[in-house]
Image (spheres, coloured by chain):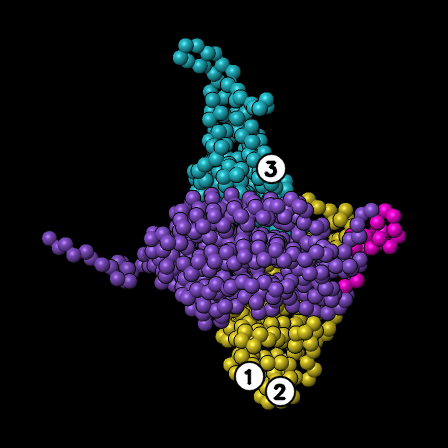
Chain colours: A cyan, B yellow, C purple
């Protein structure tokens, strides 16, 4: 039991009954541990996600107890499975309906790059239509790998600057995908 | 039921229709002309000597090397009580792709014919809703035909030369891109 | 004061019909397919379906892959029970080539296929529970599926998309650990499965919800090409394992459960009983497991052991040819079907003697019976339509291929 990591407090000034720290750190910590995912499960990776959600691997430990199927209330878009070209516009619509800040995780080889389906009807990676934050390779990835991807998202969320969504860099990124 | 009794029953109703019955791997396979398809299938379904109540499968095949018989539609029928399976094939050429629909006889044929139309372009006359089912509605070509490549030639992240192929069956890399541009 | 409640009959209050878009992304449709419903209040007048949102062009890909590389493709058809798809494909190729496998291979295949069937039915029944609001059963049964995944991992190394089996047999014999896990599973699982059954099958709320939801008669089901538990729930006892036995299923003694009305409750109960029957088959297979080889003696199609490849010339050449896909497949056409989790999964294979199939068509049960969905939900309430869809066990991978 030596390798148990205790969560580090953010850096700050402590005193009797108060703790002062940067707003960004607190918000980041709160966001990272209470993400509301939108499971966009299309195929086989979706079944591995259901196993990850189950009691054995338990995604609820990471604060993701409540799956939000409405994009308006979701923070994290988890795209799990093959996205065909027919599905691309719908994926884009769901992404656009999500409110900022939002993150995208592409679970599985098909979502990352088209997977084994190098065919005329499959979108070769969802980053052709929406910007992606974390890619989880695998066909399908084991639940441990999906959890690893989630933890990387949590790191991204925790360290993100509060002003990132208003920067020119982010706007250019969205424009490159023609998302207004 | 066995091969002899079935062939006799068909012969009694449609004399001279079956010229060369084949039996690859134990399944009786009959090739019939397109205009006899509906009468024969109705007979096979309703007559008690045949009693093929179940349509197992319906698919198309493309034989680009055969001139007048380029596209085949293959039907698998099953007599559940006698446990006898039958395969029927009709052939059509590229100019006249009309095959009558079986969706009035077997409701299962509805989507299977739409899929065959989507993949090969075979026109099932009398079908209630013959539109594309699996591919996108605005696709302009029928992808399962042998002349079209499997890969999407407009993809930008993979270079065909590194995959050891320069296109599909004699079509070069550049011609491949042209076909994709024409077809959208 | 007028105290009798006003009952609005089927005519709506103001005569307007609403169009509701159910899907393609919807929490209750497990898989992506779209239904555009025309509704009169809560009642469904008609439905129009759009499928193909996950069309991956399996049949086109299969024309360009050597025979042993098509097994991973078949995995992704009905991914809840992928071993059945894999082994069905192996058996199709064996029928085309004319290979006969040893009895031990048949029994091993039966065990794996029945485990896959159990895992598929567990998903479907748990999800019927979830759609009626009973999420607990889902969490319990997914724990059990982890045990099945552990068994698959011991056999082939993967949990979900297993690529299990080879043309001619298995890639390795079942280890002692795998046999121990199967024995433990057979001992522990029935108790917990009965708990799950007790939660739902005699639960008044559940029964009131699902009885009468989405019925279909046996005749209409046959006309629509239904197979599998959906057809058996409608009263027709067609099971490919009994009608055209393959892989020594004729040696096993099992019942085929049949329902009456073809509604959601019947489909649920048929699947429950099929899980019990699968457990019985696995028990019989374990008890009667014959000794012998775990693969047929077909060096042209089955990889030789690696140590021989380094020492013997023939083994080296066979290894090279099999890996490069230059197997000598005879010309011909064959149709072979297995009883998948959803019904008759058929493979229609036309070979022209080349290294890849000339035409491979999958007879996908989901695709064929999903056509009947508008007829099944016509006139029912929206909540019943959701239940009907989840009880039909429509797997998107098998629907679109």
Same chain for mark 3 and mark 2? The answer is no
In space, the residues marked 2 and 1 are separated at their CA atoms by 10 Å
Residue at (77, 66) in percent of width and height:
C330
What is the residue that sits farthest to the top in this orientation? A16
Locate residue C262, reporting x and y percent: 43, 64
Question: Badge 2: how crowded within 10 Å, few (<14), some, or many (20+)?
Answer: few
Q: Position of residue C176 (x, y in %)?
A: 66, 46
The vertical placement of C289 against B66, above or below, is above
Q: Which residue is mark 2?
A: B8
Q: Is residue C310 magenta?
A: yes
Q: Residue pushed farthest left?
A: C1
Residue located at (77% from left, 63% from top): C329
**Of all residues shown, which one is farthest toward the front?**
C287
User: Of helix, strand and loop, which one carries label 2?
Assistant: helix
Which chain is mark 1 on?
Answer: B
* Residue marked by disc 3: A145
Q: Are marks 1 and 3 in contact (CB under 8 Å)?
A: no
**Quadrant location, the C terminus of chain C:** bottom right
Pointer 2 and pointer 1 on the same chain: yes
* Separation of marks 1 and 3 at Cα, in angstroms: 59 Å
Magenta segment: does it hold A59?
no
Q: Are marks 3 and 2 in contact (CB under 8 Å)?
A: no
Crowd tier of the residue under label 3, counting other residues whose Cα lies within 10 Å: few below 14, some 14–19, many 20 or above: some
Residue C44, visible in the rendered structure: no
Label 3 resides on the chain identified as A
Q: Which residue is mark 1?
A: B49
Q: Is residue C66 above or below residue A56?
A: below
In the image: residue A127, left or right of residue C392: right
Quadrant in the picture for residue C73 = bottom right
Q: Viewed as shown, does residue A88 lie left or right of B170? A: left
Q: Is residue B115 or residue C306 the one in the foreground? A: C306
């Amino acid at each position: 039991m030596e390798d148990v990591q205790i969560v580090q407090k953010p850096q700050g000034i402590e005193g009797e009954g108060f703790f002062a720290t940067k707003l960004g750190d607190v918000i980041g910590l709160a966001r990272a541990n209470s993400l509301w995912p939108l499971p966009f499960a299309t195929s086989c990776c979706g079944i591995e996600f259901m196993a990850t959600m189950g009691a054995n691997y338990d995604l609820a430990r990471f604060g993701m107890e409540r799956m939000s199927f409405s994009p308006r209330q979701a923070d994290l878009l988890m795209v799990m499975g093959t996205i065909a070209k027919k599905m691309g516009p719908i994926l884009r619509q769901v992404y656009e309906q999500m409110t900022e800040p939002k993150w995208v995780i592409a679970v599985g080889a098909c979502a990352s790059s088209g997977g084994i389906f190098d065919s005329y009807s499959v979108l070769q990676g969802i980053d052709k239509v929406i910007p992606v934050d974390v890619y989880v390779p695998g066909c399908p990835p084991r639940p441990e790998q999906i959890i690893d991807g989630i933890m990387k998202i949590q790191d991204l969320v925790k360290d993100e600057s509060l002003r990132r969504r208003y920067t020119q860099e982010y706007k250019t990124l969205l424009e490159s995908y023609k998302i207004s | 039921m066995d091969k002899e009794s079935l062939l006799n029953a068909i012969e009694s109703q449609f004399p001279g229709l079956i010229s060369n019955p084949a039996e690859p791997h134990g399944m009786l396979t009959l090739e019939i002309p397109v205009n006899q398809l509906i009468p024969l299938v109705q007979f096979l379904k309703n007559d008690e000597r045949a009693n093929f109540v179940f349509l197992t499968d319906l698919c198309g095949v493309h034989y680009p090397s055969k001139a007048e018989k380029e596209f085949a539609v293959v039907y698998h029928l099953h007599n559940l009580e006698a446990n006898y399976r039958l395969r029927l094939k009709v052939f059509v050429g590229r100019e006249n792709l009309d095959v009558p629909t079986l969706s009035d006889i077997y409701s299962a044929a509805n989507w299977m014919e739409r899929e065959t139309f989507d993949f090969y372009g075979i026109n099932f006359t009398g079908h209630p809703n013959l539109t594309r089912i699996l591919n996108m509605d605005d696709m302009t070509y029928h992808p399962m035909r042998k002349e079209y490549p499997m890969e999407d030639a407009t993809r930008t992240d993979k270079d065909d030369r590194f995959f050891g192929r320069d296109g599909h069956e004699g079509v070069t890399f550049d011609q491949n891109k042209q076909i994709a541009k024409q077809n959208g | 004061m007028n105290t009798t409640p006003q009952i609005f009959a089927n005519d709506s209050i103001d005569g307007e019909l609403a169009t509701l878009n159910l899907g393609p992304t919807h929490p209750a449709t497990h898989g992506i397919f779209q239904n555009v419903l025309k509704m009169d209040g809560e009642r469904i007048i008609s439905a129009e379906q759009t499928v193909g949102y996950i069309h991956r062009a399996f049949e086109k890909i299969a024309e360009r892959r050597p025979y042993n590389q098509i097994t991973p493709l078949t995995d992704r058809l009905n991914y809840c029970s992928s071993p059945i798809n894999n082994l069905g494909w192996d058996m199709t190729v064996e029928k085309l080539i004319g290979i006969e496998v040893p009895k031990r291979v048949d029994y091993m295949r039966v065990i794996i296929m029945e485990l896959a069937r159990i895992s598929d039915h567990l998903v479907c029944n748990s999800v019927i529970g979830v759609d009626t609001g009973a999420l607990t059963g889902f969490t319990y049964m997914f724990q059990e599926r982890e045990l099945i995944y552990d068994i698959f991992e011991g056999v082939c190394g993967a949990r979900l998309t297993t690529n299990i089996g080879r043309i001619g047999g298995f890639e390795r014999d079942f280890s002692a650990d795998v046999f121990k896990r199967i024995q433990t599973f057979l001992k522990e699982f029935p108790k917990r499965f009965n708990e799950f059954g007790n939660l739902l099958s005699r639960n008044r709320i559940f029964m009131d919800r699902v009885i009468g939801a989405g019925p279909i008669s046996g005749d209409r089901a046959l006309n629509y090409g239904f197979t599998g538990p959906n057809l058996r729930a409608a009263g027709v006892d067609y099971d490919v394992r009994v009608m055209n036995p393959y892989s020594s299923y004729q040696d096993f003694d099992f019942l085929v459960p049949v329902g009456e009305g073809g509604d959601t409750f019947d489909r649920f109960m048929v699947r429950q009983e099929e899980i019990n029957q699968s457990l019985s088959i696995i028990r019989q297979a374990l008890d009667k497991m014959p000794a012998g080889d775990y693969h047929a003696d077909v060096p042209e199609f089955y990889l030789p052991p690696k140590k021989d490849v380094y020492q013997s010339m023939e083994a080296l050449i066979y290894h090279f040819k099999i890996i490069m896909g230059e197997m000598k497949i005879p010309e011909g056409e064959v149709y072979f079907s297995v009883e998948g989790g959803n019904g008759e999964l058929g493979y229609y294979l036309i070979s022209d003697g080349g290294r890849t199939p000339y035409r491979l068509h999958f007879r996908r049960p989901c695709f064929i019976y999903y056509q009947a969905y508008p007829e099944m939900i016509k006139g029912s309430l929206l909540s019943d339509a959701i239940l009907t869809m989840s009880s039909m066990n429509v797997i998107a991978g098998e629907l679109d291929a």
